[in-house]
Image (cartoon, grey):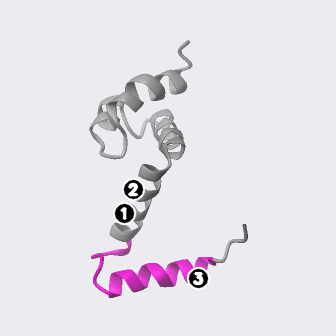
Amino acid sequence: MANLTTPELLEDEIKAVVRAGNYRSKEEAVGHALEVLLAANPHLRMNTAVELYRQSKVTLSRSAKSPAWSWKLSKNGLLRKACRFP
């Protein structure tokens, strides 16, 4: 599948949704887009959670409170994958 989105077009689209009043800022628009992406793709959510945990950016407790990550994901998947538990 060919990628029809260029970095310039992506930037223009983000600016347009903000100017249209749908979001207060670029960060809010990008944050929502990432939230939707991770909610729709559990494997991306898992890999992102593991990477943030490895970088000490989040704790298991914090990931459990996040709407993007479920406690079950943290308890059963994240800890085992990040720490190499059997």
Secondary structure beneath label 2: helix
Q: Quadrant of residue 25?
A: bottom left
| Residue extent of the magenta highlight | 5-26
Q: Which residue is mark 1?
A: 32
Q: Residue at x 42, y 83 (%)?
A: 15
Are discs 2 and 1 less than 8 Å apart at CB? yes
* Quarter that holds the N terminus: bottom right
Cα–Cα gap, marks 2 and 1: 5 Å
Residue 16 painted magenta: yes
Residue 24 in percent (x, y) is at: 27, 76
Q: Residue at x 46, y 56 (%)?
A: 37
Cα–Cα gap, marks 3 and 1: 20 Å
Q: Which residue is mark 2?
A: 35
Give neighbour class at mark 3: few <14, some 14-19, many 20+ (Cα, 10 Å). few
Amino acid type at circle 3 is Glu
Secondary structure beneath label 1: helix
Amino acid type at circle 1 is His
SS majority, magenta: helix
Residue 42 in percent (x, y) is at: 48, 43
Secondary structure beneath label 3: helix
Q: Which residue is mark 3?
A: 8
Q: Tell which tag, 3 or 1, sits nearer the viewer.
A: 1
